[in-house]
Image: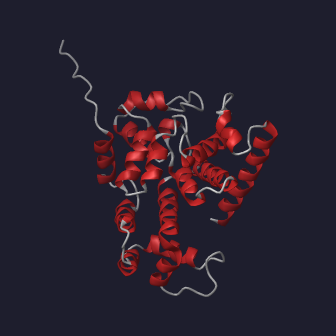
Amino acid sequence: MPRRAAFMPVSPKDLVQAFLSAGSLPLSRSISQLQDMLRRADYNACDLAEHLRMDPTLATRVMAVANSAFFSRQPCESIDLAVNRLGTVQLTRIFSQVLASAAMLRPLRAYELRGDAIWRRSVFSAVGAEMAAGRRGGDRSAAYMVGLLHQIGMLVVEALWEKQGNPKKFSYVDFEREYTADEIKLCGHDQATLGAELLRQLSFPASVVTAVTRQYAHPVEPVERELYVGRLVRACAYEVPTLDPHMDVLKEFNLGATSHLEAFLADVREETQNLMHAA
């Protein structure tokens, strides 16, 4: 009887490159090019605007935000003006929103999640992380981005699951580990590792990549701790609430008392519903 070939581990870099090459992530090429431009300290706003003109989805979203009540005192009639008005931070946030909304409205059969489930969970986490950052004067935009994109690695895992024709669905273990055991069994890596590599290849900021990578580790950096709060309130709202949260993190945001955490969760839920209705 012939021996089965030994399993050959594939690196996150190779898995993600194959995922992107297959066209599995809408807008990824456009966003990668634009992010590369934004990373340069001396990027040319005119060149960036020219790239945006080639992608109607991104251009429309940029114009809508530039003309929103928050940014606009007078109408912004060109994409060039919109780029100058918004700046690097807001443009990166817009790209993350467009990427997430385009990619996360599909069912994830391996995780038994319906079409909009990962999108709603991601927005909930994003709002929670952003509100946590606001409690101590942190970078709200970075926290929102990390919260929104921290589960994007699930898309890579799902594609591998479908390719292998694996009939076994993943099992949620607990808040600290989520689906990592089955993810690693399938492809040798968890979704956090693959999601971080995906964002790295799409040229998202290093702080975002690192926070996504470390989402199952004890949070150390500010944005990691803000993501922890976002993940926690998402778990309370959609999955089984954790019974043993990191109290040092919660106390940092004045969420150590159960009543404070419940009030915060209610605020996140209300703001998330407002965002969903406005979308």
Look at the image and tell me whether residue 203 can be seen.
Answer: yes
Q: Quadrant of the C terminus?
A: bottom right
Q: Is residue 248 left or right of residue 167?
A: right
Q: Quadrant of residue 46?
A: bottom left
Find residue 195 and report its horizontal and vertical position in percent: 43, 45
Give 266 or 277, whichever is nearer the viewer. Answer: 266
Q: Looking at the picture, does residue 71 appear above or below residue 120? A: below
Residue found at the far left of this picture: 2
Measuring 72% from the left and 51% from the top, which residue is drawn there? 269
Measuring 44% from the left and 49% from the top, which residue is drawn there? 209
Residue found at the far top of this picture: 1
Measuring 41% from the left and 59% from the top, which residue is drawn there? 26
Q: Quadrant of the N terminus?
A: top left
Look at the image and tell me whether residue 237 can be seen.
Answer: no
Q: Looking at the picture, does residue 109 appear above or below residue 33? A: above
Find residue 98 and report its horizontal and vertical position in percent: 50, 63
Measuring 33% from the left and 46% from the top, which residue is drawn there? 16
Count up the numbered dots: 0
Q: How is the image coloured?
A: secondary structure
Q: Is residue 251 left or right of residue 12?
A: right
Q: Quadrant of residue 27?
A: bottom left
Q: Is residue 271 left or right of residue 37?
A: right
Give 48 or 218, whichever is nearer the viewer. Answer: 218
Q: Looking at the picture, does residue 254 appear above or below residue 173? A: below
Find residue 109 and report its horizontal and vertical position in percent: 49, 39
Find residue 12 and report its horizontal and vertical position in percent: 33, 40
